[in-house]
């Protein structure tokens, strides 16, 4: 069998500032210029890693089901956003919804929250999967839309998902996932513990993640890898944000990606630690045995590599 051709993910001759149609460098602030420089570095790094991974060409994956069902298309601003759970996705959906000028508090309550796809569809924020397939008009809308994504350190994201879904009241996750996790990974689990499903330990959660990813079963978006959730090597994202920098980068995205220049538009997210007082990330990951830790790092290897995160436990 002939060797597979290595694909260069980058767009020759196209700079990030050209894609985002930024104003002249003299008219943007030093902070905005620094963000642009970071974008160029992140784009180049992702390009290099995707090339090393020998992934298919972008046009072969543009309408891939696993990403198109998740990605939101804002026709008013001609923007595509790939929401990633535990990375300010609620705040981004709320910001985009507010910019549509069709959202009000009663609607959010009626539909049970900003994540409801029916609500988002009604205010003009449907998914890419809902666009007519393979029509020239749909392709042009998708290709020409500015696309953005926000990421964070994978181990930080997984711990945040655990703390949010398994240490707080959440009947859905306790019933659908907690019961299964305790039954499968807790030695001598009692019937009461299994039926309750509400006291999953972090080590049990990680054992479950490894099992589900290896067997491709019961994978929830809260811990689905970026590679499969947003297809970063198959879709050209014009802006790659980091959660750690979101307070600065959100303003930039609103101004240059969404095209909203008004200073009255704010991003409703405050960066804060999900950790209980006195606890650190290390306190949780030291509960994981070496074999499981190696497996976990391997399963999320692409997520670490694509976005330049070190495969070590974050210090904060």
Image (cartoon, rainbow, N blue to C red):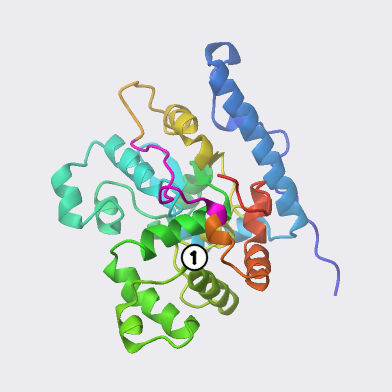
Instruction: Single out the residue that lies furthest toward the right.
Output: 2
Q: Is residue 132 visible?
A: no
The foreground one among 12 and 186 is 186
Q: Quadrant of the C terminus?
A: top right
Q: Residue 36: x and y, percent? A: 60, 28
Q: Is residue 233 above or below residue 209?
A: above
Span colored in magenta: 268-282
Q: How many marks?
A: 1
Q: Is residue 81 above or below residue 65?
A: above
- Residue in the picture at 55% in, 21% down: 31
Circle 1 residue? 65
Report the predominant secondary structure element of the magenta stretch: loop
Q: Locate residue 221 relative to residue 198 in the image: left or right.
A: right
Q: Relative to 29, does residue 45 appear above or below in the rendering?
A: below
- The residue at 67%/60% (across/down) is 301
Q: Position of residue 122 (x, y in %)?
A: 24, 51
Determine the image quadrant of residue 213. bottom right
């Amino acid at each position: 069998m002939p060797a597979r051709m290595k694909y260069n993910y980058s767009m020759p001759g196209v700079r990030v500032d050209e894609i985002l149609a930024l104003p002249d460098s003299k008219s943007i602030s030093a902070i905005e210029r620094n963000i642009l420089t970071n974008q160029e570095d992140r784009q180049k790094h992702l390009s290099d890693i995707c090339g090393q991974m020998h992934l298919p060409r972008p046009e072969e994956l543009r309408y891939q089901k696993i990403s198109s069902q998740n990605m939101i298309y804002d026709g008013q601003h001609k923007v595509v956003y790939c929401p990633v759970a535990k990375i300010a996705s609620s705040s981004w959906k709320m910001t985009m919804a507010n910019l549509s000028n069709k959202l009000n508090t009663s609607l959010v309550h009626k539909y049970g929250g900003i994540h409801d796809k029916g609500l988002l569809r009604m205010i003009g924020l449907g998914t890419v999967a809902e666009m007519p397939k393979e029509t020239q008009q749909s392709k042009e809308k998708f290709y020409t839309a500015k696309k953005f994504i926000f990421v964070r350190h994978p181990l930080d994201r997984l711990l945040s998902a655990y703390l949010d879904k398994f240490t707080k009241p959440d009947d859905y996750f306790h019933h659908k996932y907690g019961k299964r996790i305790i039954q499968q990974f807790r030695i001598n689990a009692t019937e009461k513990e299994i039926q309750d499903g509400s006291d999953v330990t972090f080590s049990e959660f990680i054992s479950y993640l490894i099992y589900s990813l290896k067997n491709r079963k019961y994978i929830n978006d809260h811990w689905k890898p970026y590679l499969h959730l947003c297809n970063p090597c198959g879709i050209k994202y014009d802006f790659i944000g980091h959660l750690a920098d979101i307070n600065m980068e959100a303003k930039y995205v609103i101004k240059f990606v969404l095209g909203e220049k008004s200073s009255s538009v704010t991003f409703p997210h405050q960066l804060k630690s999900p950790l209980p007082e006195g606890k650190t990330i290390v306190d949780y990951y030291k509960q994981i045995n070496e074999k499981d830790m190696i497996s976990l790092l391997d399963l999320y290897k692409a997520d670490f590599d694509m976005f330049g995160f070190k495969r070590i436990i974050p210090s904060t």
